[in-house]
Amino acid sequence: MEEKRASKGSGGAIPFLIGFVLSAVFLWIIFPQVIYCQKDQPIRFSHTVHKEQGMECSGCHFFREDGSYAGLPSNEQCAECHTDLMGQDPAEAKYVKEFLEKGRAVPWLIYQYQPDNVYFSHKAHDGFECTDCHPNLGDSDTPPPHYRNVITGYSKQTMKMWQCERCHAEGGVSNACYVCHK
Amino acid sequence: MGLNRRRFITFAVGGAVGSLFTPVIWKLTDDVSIWTQNWGWIPRLKKGADSAVPTVSKLCASGCAVKVETVGGAPYGTKGNKDNPLSGGGICPLCASGAQLMNSPARVKGPMKKTGEGKYDPVSWDEALEVLAAKLKSAAGGDGKALFISGDDSGTANEVFSAFMAKLGQSGFYYMPGEAQAAGRAWRETMNGSGQVGFDIEDSDCVLFIGADALDSWGPTVRNQKAFDATHPLGAEAAAKYVYAGPVQTRTAAVCDKWVPVAPGGAAAFALGLAAILIKNGASASAADFAEFKSLVLAKFTPGQVEKMTGVKAAVLADVAKTLMEAQRPVVVPGALGGGAAGFAAGAALNVLLGRFNAKGGMVALPQAPKVVSGAMGPAQALGNDLAGYLAAVAAGKAKAPEVAMVYEANPVYALPQAETMSAGLAKAGFVVSFSTYLDETAAGADLILPAPHPYERFDDLQTPYGLGRFTYCLGAPVAEPQLDVRSTPDVILGLAAKLGQDLGFETFEDVLKAKVEAIGGNWDELAAGAAFTRSGQVSGGVSLGAATLGQAAFPAKATAPVAVAPVMRLNVGSGHVATPPHNPTTIRDTELKGSVMCVQVCKATAKQLGVSEGSKVKLTGAGGECKALVHVFEGVMPGVVAVPLGFGHTAWDEFSKGKGDNVNKILTARIEPGSGLTTWAGSTVNVAKM
Amino acid sequence: MSHGHAKEFKVRWGMVVDVDKCTGCGACMVACQVENNISPMVRQDKENYLPSMTFERDDPSNKMRTLTWLMVYELSNRKDYPDHEVAFLPRPCMQCGNPACVPVCPVVATDKNEEGGIVSQIYPRCIGCRYCMAACPYHARYFNWFDPIWPKGMDKALSPRTSVRPRGVVEKCNFCHTRFLKAKERARQEGIDPNELPEGYYTPACVEVCPTGAITFGDLNNPEHKVHQLAHGKYAFRLLEKLGLDPQVYYLTKRDWVRKQGDNYLANEEPHAKKH
């Protein structure tokens, strides 16, 4: 009984505060590192090298006739130039050897991968800058790492529904379920 | 300040509260909820360009002109090809499952050799072809040693097959019996017709289908349905009258203006009864045998006699005749389901009497595409060969069994009438080779399986599928690379020919098709892009009325059992060649198949007479076999008739068809039709016993 | 949302089905399953992680368990031979103006709020309570009693247009809604106002494949669209019109008995006046 009374008097808030601060700081720093695993693209694709060759963004990223968006070029499109090795870059050699020649599609890691139940129309968002939503890869020599959420499997940069809804609401666009879902 | 229990708890609580000021809890809750939306066993969708690639689909008997929907190059769906007159945008329920059948679990994955009863080992193509070449070499010399059965009645592939057989000194090239074969033979042999007979339904204002379930399973169904569509505009009065005559109120009957119940096997008598009325009203024809025909129908097919043979009342018969006579451009479309020549010939004669032969909206004789493979069998001979008759003779020991039997795109073990007898005949062959895409009943009993690609993976063509009223040619180019170890059968045969030292003049089937396209004057690129090559024009020349044959063949066979069988084919259930595709079981009603037992349909009067009621378990026994079924009372069946569904009772294939229902081909009775000598099973009768 | 408070839409996508032209062939039902990734009825789940919990699934002839967003019913005039008649009636979701299913949903997984008037169904949001199924008088809603299974290899041939649903959620016809989204995308690409789609830009799978042209589709509000005139024609009727749910699916028939059955009248009851 004596002990108890003594401890009560000795400022119980301090361990609480220590616990509070330690946990908050620790979880703010550690948690994001634990929940996301960092992955590199299968091929170190350099946008700058391709731009230096005089290629336009729309040479690979373009709208098809039906208005759908060809986000990533297929092997056939790459093969229009890369019939054989064009440069000295080991990344190119890796691409030609491991993917193009074997006819395998490159499993690019998509930074904004959306679930199957989302229908995102690039055409409907044509007025925006690409970099409003996407990281600016166009000026990168090495693509930034991809952070994959170990629980959900989605990328860290995958836009959440509230973000879509906020922008729609601000722009006066309908937030009806079927505007985006399939 | 030392650490005691109280301080530790305070510390822990502080930590817990602190964690609430981090995103951890909220993020974890959110992530876990997202995680639950993506179970590992729920497949993900493929991304990529969505396109529609034209080709032809040969899953239904007549073939559909389709557009295969692909995502990132992989087929996933099938729709009709609007720009092709065979489709007009429509599609049949079999070809609608094309992409699913391409990935079906029933597909044969690669060449297989039989090692024991029901046991197979995969072999290489080289080894398999070596075996087959050796067998064929030993079979050479002496006709009748090899047999080729083709289930494709409109493809140029048949030229390769029959030329190959001819080079082997064999004349045993057969089509599977069906509408095209029966009508083709009756047209040439009974009617002395030339070219390919067809029906210009599109331009007709009155169509009488006699036993031809044209809006569901007869002929080029989709084109028939499109013709019906065009003459029956939505929300307005119809521009044409459609009448269906047959024992069962089929899907065709459901939308026709009138259903005239005609007893099974009575189609010819019904048509001749109409002919008698037309002649009495002054109809005539320049055919050489008109006088003979006239005296036949006036003597033997009076309304009273016809009523006895077909169950059609005199007033109804007169009414149908009146409809035909009042129409501007009537056409009679006779079905030949059940083989034989009589049904077709009587209907065709009716068209001649109506003055509708080679007329707009009538019955037409169409030119045929020139042959490109030298030595290939002409249509007259190929259509004339009667497979059912031959196999029945082999089974009975009256004909010598072949040493090698090759089967392409056909399932004779399952689909021939009196199936058990016929498959016994085929089993007598020394060595059976199946060129099947699927593990069907014939493949499952074959000594060697050399799998063919799915229609979306190969070159193929359609030359005026039977029933069309216009010369039409369509080409199918591959949409996707085969994922399995399969080879196009005509290519395999061309390779085999080279191996045996034959020269068929072509190295690949693609070259054969190119020659064919050139011969008809078509444009390869346009055809490969899904267009159809059509040409108007008919083969002129008189035809007879088939009086000599009809005089013997038009009378219904004597019943040997109390209930007449009316086989009903519903295309969504499958054809003789393709079993129920994976998505089709849900389209089959629970009044057609219940669990694993099929339903047969009888009307109340018949049910009462047989002492059965809705849901009764019955056994149907025919001359060659028996079937089990449940009774479904349906007032759209004539009294004294049991409607039985074709397409059930598979013993091979996959879980979507295997063991579901019974094969009614077993209870059909094959007999020789007097007058024509053709095998027929029209008017088969059965005993129906409650189980 | 109670009666009388239905949302007004500028565009109302609607279907007109001619019962007299439907042969019941089933091509539409197949195309629907393909388009919407409805898995075939596989009996056994061979790759389930918990084999002890797996059991044989229902047979496709058990129509309580099949998923048929579009169901073709067989109607009979109930007369004896030879006066018997049959008709086939395809039944998609009616996309009611006053849907009975929407107000009962406790989690707003289903709603009628998008321009075009298609009743939405969001699968990840659905908790599987099935109130909506109980509410729908057309039996147009279906419950996933099982996880979808495609036979090996067939899962590679999935349609990119509809997300795959797990066990435990309700689903229904949505007029192949992704085709609507795609049509708007195409219109934008071609410089056409996506809110005024020309006829033929948006066609559901069943309408597209129907070989007899029994189904027509378009904007019921747009007098230039065929469905507008057809829905106002003298042969038009709607199913269970008397319930006042204002369906966006119309039927045509010249046969009185079909029309009578469409409103489920008693044997001696006279049909009520038709409303539009």
Image (tube, coloured by chain):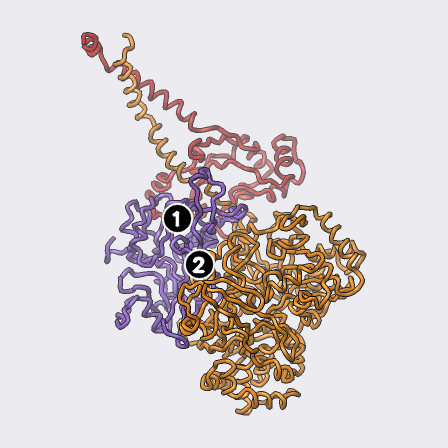
Seen at 28% across and 60% down, the residue is C245
**Of the residues tagged 1 and 2, which is closer to the observer?**
2
Asked whether the viewer can see residue A92, the reply is yes
Seen at 42% across and 28% down, the residue is A35
**Considering the numbered disc 1 on the image, is that residue within a helix, a strand or a loop?**
loop
- Tell which chain the image draws in orange: B
> Given the image, on which type of amino acid does mark 2 rest?
Lys
- Tell which chain the image draws in red: A
Q: Chain of mark 2?
A: B
Q: At which x and y percent is residue A21? A: 31, 18
- Is A46 left or right of B133, judged from the image as shown? left
Residue matched to label 2:
B594
Q: CA distance from mark 1 to mark 2?
A: 21 Å
Q: Nearer the viewer, residue C123 or B322?
A: B322
Residue matched to label 1:
C144
Asked whether the viewer can see residue B521, the reply is no
- Tell which chain the image draws in purple: C
Q: Are marks 1 and 2 on the same chain?
A: no
Q: At which x and y percent is residue B682? A: 56, 73
Q: At which x and y percent is residue C154? A: 53, 48
> Given the image, on which type of amino acid does mark 1 rest?
Asn
| Number of marks drawn | 2
Q: Nearer the viewer, residue B518 or B361?
A: B361
